[in-house]
Amino acid sequence: MSKQERWSKLLELLAVNGKLDVEEAAVSVAVSPATIRRDLDELAEQKLLVRTRGGAIAHGVSYELPLRYKSSRQVAEKQRIASAVADLLGVGDVVGLNGGTTTTEVARALVLRTGAMAERGDNSSGPMCTVVTNALNIAGELAVRPQFKIVVTGGVARPQTYELVGQLTEGVLNQVVLDVAVLGVDGVDPQLGVMTHHEDEAGISRLFAERARKVILATDSSKMGKRAFARICGLDQIDVLVTDSGLAPDMATRLTDAGIEVISV
């Protein structure tokens, strides 16, 4: 297991339990307690967790997602999806992230990837990535990291999802150009396209897609074939779908026929 895979597993355990014990984590990851201590120290330096005596606890608001998200999170699947999405992004890209648990995991995967790049000496004079987001928790998690340039939209905060919406949000997005937009959604239908539960969030996600050269849909397979109240856009605006291995073969075929590159992890 590579260091990045080990770190992802530790963060998965932390997301589920809210805390980590060195000895228990060592058993779960099948490495020595000394390795776990070094991993936790490095993750604390990345501000992905807070070290405690004998372990670690979750770091700040980024893990304090609303309860309705916590109870239904498919953590392992979403972390695999996030890692695959991060691998599709290039150094120096301007990336748009809307709100949600999967895009939050994408932000964390970017942190892990840029941390590994820095260890290899792959540093540049500018930020490794510019992230434009309307999600307060994502902005808070990335703002403390100098390898990222963070652009936060204005707007009115929705407490259920930590997303900023409204005319102020639209005003900022209308002034930027994105290389890639990564969208988390609540439903994907072969006829209607991609959807979310709230019309104000749908409008902002639609604008993310319109401002981007490439649109990546990051969602677990439980959302496939589902419908939600508010339509974001048609499948013709989606370039890549990254999902988990639970995607039904017939759905994968229909999406591929629609011109979407389908990546199952």
Image (tube, rainbow, N blue to C red):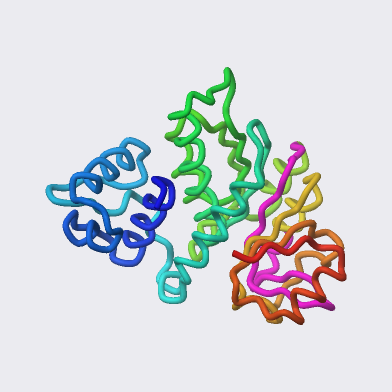
Q: Horizontal and vertical percent for residue 67?
A: 40, 71
What residue lies at 74% left-to-right and 58% top-to-bottom? 240
Q: Hey, which quadrant is residue 232 in on the image?
A: bottom right
Q: Horizontal and vertical percent for residue 168?
A: 67, 46
Horizontal side of 195 relative to 210 (left or right) equals left
Horizontal side of 49 relative to 8 (left or right) equals left
Residue at the top extreme?
125
Q: Horizontal and vertical percent for residue 165?
A: 63, 55
- Residue 34, placed above or below residue 115: below
What residue lies at 53% left-to-right and 33% top-to-bottom? 148
Q: Horizontal and vertical percent for residue 50?
A: 26, 46
Taking the magenta stretch, the answer to whether it contains residue 188 is yes
Residue 227 seen by the camera: no
Task: Give the camera-side residue of 207 and 70.
Answer: 70
Task: Give the camera-side residue of 192 and 128.
Answer: 128
Residue range highlighted in magenta = 176-203
What residue lies at 62% left-to-right and 52% top-to-bottom? 85
